[in-house]
Image: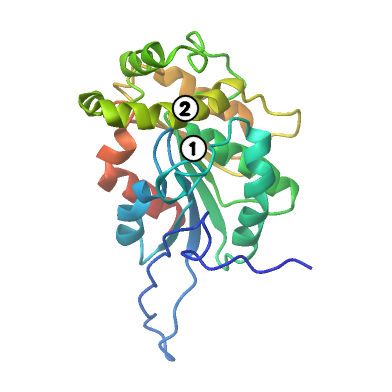
Amino acid sequence: MSQTTPAPGTDPWLPFPPPAAAPAPEPGNGRRARARLLCFPCAGQGASAYRTWQRLLAADVEVVPVQLPGREGRATEAAHTTMEGLMAELLPVLVELAAEAEAGYALFGHSLGALVAYEAARRLEAAGRVPLGLTVAAQRPPHLPLEREPVHDLPRAAFMTTLGLYGQVPVELFDDPAAVALAAAALRADFTLVETYAPADGPRLRCPVTALAGLADTSLPPRAMRAWQDLTEGPFTFRPVPGDHFFVGERTDELVAVLRAALG
């Protein structure tokens, strides 16, 4: 028999409880069920990246940021370098979150988080928990080859410099040598996972997929994001967004509107 997942805030995977929904206007003043959105951050970032979304979407969507090991409150834990190792720990948590979502659930992932969200969606569908949708941002679909040389095994200085050239780390990070040293190990683990991930053979997704591409993202041509349509039998939407690789943190109002329309 499955056990109920600990409430967000008491589980290291779920550090930020979603705000409560406003009471419904119907007699009885109950609360209406909200769709649940599981959010996965980009390389080097943590679950706090989605705190603003929790506030802005509280009336319509229950935003649940997922905290991966090796960042923020889990900084002392080793970050995973393989998708299989990550899923072995994370999937049971996600299965329970999906099962408990009264109005259904969806997944959102940015960069590294897009691959994590995709693999999670595959495994959740295989477990009989088909999501309302998957939204991926700023990441090539995993069936396409890298359009650059791998970087995860470069020496630290070359590794960080190369990430900066590709626009995959904020430029302000390089102003703080201590921050560079702290970030390098976690980023290397994240990029090892990204660059070595190869999905096992299996059916295409059944859920709708939305792919968001930053028009100024120098690390990923927008055409690559269109190839996410190859991975689903459901509806596919491609949406270009102004901004670079980090547009998810810069175009908050626009992305919140997209998610609200899809899930609200």
Look at 56% across and 20% down and name the residue there.
195
Look at 32% across and 50% down and name the residue there.
257
Residue 162 horizontal side relative to residue 39, left or right = left
- Residue nearer the viewer, 26 or 71: 71
Specify whether residue 119 is in view.
Answer: yes
Dot 1 or dot 2, earlier in sequence: 1
Q: Secondary structure at mark 2?
A: loop
Q: How many marks?
A: 2
Residue neighbourhood size for the residue with mark 2, other residues' Cα within 10 Å, grouped as few (<14), some (14–19), many (≥20) = many
Is residue 88 shown above or below 177?
below
Tell me the distance, in whole angstroms, between the alpha carbons under discs 1 and 2: 9 Å
Residue neighbourhood size for the residue with mark 1, other residues' Cα within 10 Å, grouped as few (<14), some (14–19), many (≥20) = many
Look at 62% across and 25% down and name the residue there.
197
Q: Amino acid at mark 2?
A: Gln
Residue 95 horizontal side relative to residue 177, left or right = right
- Residue nearer the viewer, 141 or 6: 6
Judging by the rendered image, the residue that carries numbered circle 1 is: 113
Position of residue 45 measured from the top left corner of the image (x, y, whole percent) = 39, 39
Position of residue 190 measured from the top left corner of the image (x, y, whole percent) = 50, 30
Judging by the rendered image, the residue that carries numbered circle 2 is: 139
Q: Select label 1 or label 2 by which is in front.
A: 1
Give the numbered dot on residue 182.
Answer: none
Position of residue 156 measured from the top left corner of the image (x, y, whole percent) = 41, 16
Q: Amino acid at mark 1?
A: Gly
Extreme residue toward the right, this view: 1
Position of residue 153 measured from the top left corner of the image (x, y, whole percent) = 52, 14
**Contact, CB < 8 Å: mark 1 with mark 2?**
yes
Look at 48% across and 54% down and name the residue there.
37
Q: Secondary structure at mark 1?
A: helix
